[in-house]
Image (tube, rainbow, N blue to C red):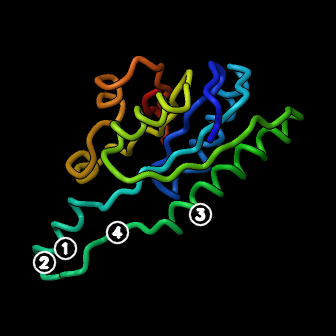
Amino acid sequence: MTMPTARSILVGLEDHATAGVVATAAAHIAMDRDATAVILLHVIDTYMAAGGLLGMSGVAVPVIETEDDGEAMLALAEAAIRAEYAALDRVVPSITRTLRAGAPAAIITQVADEMGAAAIVVGARRPHAFGRLAHPDIRASLARCTKVPVHVVPLQAGGPE
């Protein structure tokens, strides 16, 4: 476990497709803050809405994400951060990988508190109809749970900052 420090940032990763983009942006935020520690976090999601829709269509197998999937995503994010630091000839901060299960905003807040994070970095969800139904707005949820500054990485042109 990383010792709490005012120079830690927490990076909340949502999915494999966006982990590299979020991690690369987080590396720059970490550099700007002269972070000494980066905590990579993925909250395992059981995709309740998707499972419900599949159940209604007669499919009885729930859609779940495995720990191996989460570990692979964290490894990808760590590699992206290390590559960005190397490309800019900077010393890589300590990197901790964490997998948890539960409500994303609550878990992100809990880990940020446990690790003494000075900032939180998350990716902006893609604005499509199903995404808005299946996933709550993490920025709004975090704003209700924590006073730690939240940086939202845009995942497409014109997205939130």
Residue type beneath disc 4: Ile
First along the sequence among labels 3 and 4:
4
- Asked if marks 2 and 1 touch (Cβ < 8 Å), the reply is yes
Residue type beneath disc 2: Ser
- Asked if marks 1 and 3 touch (Cβ < 8 Å), the reply is no
What residue is disc 1 on?
54
Report x, y in % for residue 75: 65, 57
First along the sequence among labels 4 and 1:
1
Report x, y in % for residue 36: 73, 28
Residue type beneath disc 3: Ala
Figure label count: 4
Residue 72's tag is 3
Residue at 85% of width from left, 32% of height from top? 90
Residue at 24% of width from left, 54% of height from top? 130
First along the sequence among labels 1 and 3:
1
- Marks 1 and 3, how far apart in space? 25 Å
Q: Secondary structure at mark 3?
A: helix
Q: Which tag is nearer the camera, tag 2 or tag 3?
A: 3
